[in-house]
Image (cartoon, coloured by chain):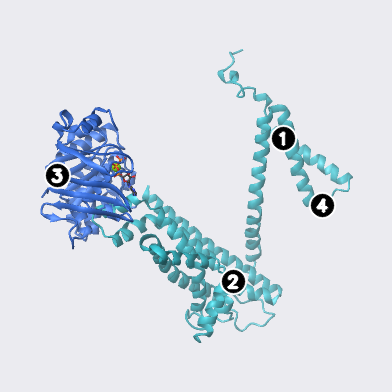
Chain colours: A cyan, B blue
Amino acid sequence: MSAPSLLDQLPGLGDQARRLHAPVRLALLALTVLVSLLLFASTPLQGRVDFVVFVVIAFALVQTGVSFALEGRRHALDRLVSLLVHLALLAAVVPLVSVLSYTVYKGLKKLDGQFLTHNLTGLGPLDTNGGEYHAIIGTLEQVLMATAIAVPLGLLVAIYITEYGKGWLAAAVRFVIDVMTGIPSIVAGLFVFAFWVIGLHRGYSGLAAAFSLTILMLPVVVRSSEEMIKLVPAELREASYALGLPKWKTILRIVLPTASAGITTGTMLAVARVTGETAPLLLTSFITPATNTSPIAGKQTAIPTFIFSQIGLGRPANYDRAWAAALTLIIIVLVLYISARLLTRRNTLTRR
Amino acid sequence: MSKRIVAEDVNAFYGSFRAIAGVSLTIEPNTVTALIGPSGCGKSTFLRTINRLHEVIPGARVEGKVMLDSEDLYGAGVDAVAVRRTIGMVFQRPNPFPTMSIYDNVAAGLRLNGIKNSKVLDEAVERSLRGANLWNEVKERLAKPGAGLSGGQQQRLCIARAIAVEPQVLLMDEPCSALDPISTLAIEDLMTDLKQRYTIVIVTHNMQQAARVSDRTGFFSLEATGEPGRLIEIDTTEKIFSNPSEKRTEDYITGRFG
Ligand SMILES: Nc1ncnc2c1ncn2[C@@H]1O[C@H](COP(=O)(O)OP(=O)(O)OP(=O)(O)O)[C@@H](O)[C@H]1O
Ligand SMILES: [Mg+2]
């Protein structure tokens, strides 16, 4: 026999036999399931969900008990907590994955070339063809316009607050932005409806919808950009001043590029958020079965309002269209989000 | 090209707090002048009054006169931005621009001041990097990010960036405090080189460094915390380190105070 290794002499490290290895734990789980099955068969206990909950609780108790007896208090506690953490992870991920996968499952049924390239004109209530072309156009135009207004404006406001704003005016601006964060989206739509659609007799349009989305995006863009600009170290600004650069050039060439990665992410989150907005669109661009490519005049359907109107009609064909449109919406948001992450990644890579 | 700095009764404030009071001194061209003194006595503050960087801090202001040859830097109608173009600065912590390559960092000052000719820029970048004793280490990777260099290399990159705009004065605030002895030595050698062309003012906590590189040394101190810092004396480095006229200077240098 070889001499005992140093490892075995250290307390707590040796004695591998007295550990609960994976196969043992699997056996414990199997045993728990078996006993639970028997219990559910022979007692008034019943129901699938009840069974799963019962097994989870029973297994937690059994494993902790066995571990306590075999491995000691510290290991037992460790096993219990890591079991809980994994359960929490599962509880968070399961709903997310099921929403996604259910939408994919339901949406794929109808999502095809024909659905993507047609609108809903000339269809009777019983027709099952038609598509969401007009809604995709609407969403892209409206979100693009809203972004084109909200991002430059929000960035300028953020720069004002962080770099130039002093005293009560900056405080007032910051307060207004904070209040804007809390505006319910329907109120933003109502505001544009009252002032633009009715008040100025402009009627429904994609532009009006973009205005309402801008109101929702602006505070998010301002706040996230402000935070990012604040993170740029004062030393970088001073280095730039010391080279003889005026303040505006320092902001444009040093501060903004350094903060750009974070600003992009914040902006993209704002975009993703408004892409799914429905309520304000009902009051600003309304719904139409026809394709309206004009961003500035006439009713225009977007994907969220398309889903809303289809669900309201209540036939199976309508539900199929709604699911397919929902899938399209998720894909659009996902593409936006992933491209934002990639942009950010590229920026951080050039930085390292 | 290098110029004389004369400070007359300079007071610097952070809000209502007076950080330095009544500083008057002359910094000769083509010399290295070291400023020493205990922490918080206003060395950095004084340095930043020379290139008008002090006033970028909200609420901060300067009273008194700083002359660069015959020009009063705080005179009416003098543009702080123009002053900073003539007076370069290197900071305690290396601060290369993180989004820029090595090349772009050095070219930043020139480029952002409107010079676009790539031949002129190429030459200036090489000259400055050679001047900062960094050229051989980075010439193969000028397009790589400046933040990817070692701390000592980054500091020399910052020196290159500062001398690329050909300032008349170079201010250095503890440029070696974050560096290893070898990088420190490289930068000290560099200062001896650079003083042929620039007037150099360096703040340091390292007595040996002050003794090694500087021609003249100024000693700052403060009576008590909350009191403004003052210039106690300034003289040739030899005199300050061998036979200072003030007892406080001697105490500080020999380690009996501060
Ligand atoms: N941004 C600031 N706002 C308010 N007070 C400041 C600021 N910077 C420095 N001070 C104060 O001014 C005084 C002088 O500071 P300064 O940085 O010039 O000291 P120093 O001599 O450079 O010290 P050290 O050797 O530690 O760098 C200190 O009392 C300090 O607290
Ligand atoms: Mg200092």
Residue type, label 3: Ile
Determine whether the residue tagged by mark 1 lies in a helix, strand or loop.
helix
Frontmost residue, A245 versus B235: B235
Residue appearing at x 71%, y 30% in the figure: A68
Q: Is residue A210 visible?
A: yes
Residue type, label 2: Pro
Determine whether A114 is above or below B241 in the image. Answer: below
Instruction: Specify whether disc 4 shares its chain with disc 2.
Output: yes
Determine whether the residue tagged by mark 4 lies in a helix, strand or loop.
loop
- Between disc 2 and disc 1, whose residue precedes? 1
Do labels 4 and 1 touch, CB within 8 Å?
Answer: no
Determine whether the residue tagged by mark 3 lies in a helix, strand or loop.
strand
Count the marks.
4
What residue is pinned by disc 2? A304
Give the class, few, some or many, for how many residues have Cα within 10 Å of label 1's Cα (few <14, many ≥20). many
Q: Chain of mark 3?
A: B
Instruction: Specify whether disc 2 shares its chain with disc 3.
Output: no
Residue appearing at x 49%, y 79% in the figure: A293
Q: Chain of mark 2?
A: A
What residue is pinned by disc 1? A64
Place of residue A198 in the rendered image (x, y in percent of width and height, measured from the top left): 53, 85
Which numbered mark, 4 or 1, is in the foreground of this view?
1
What residue is pinned by disc 3? B27
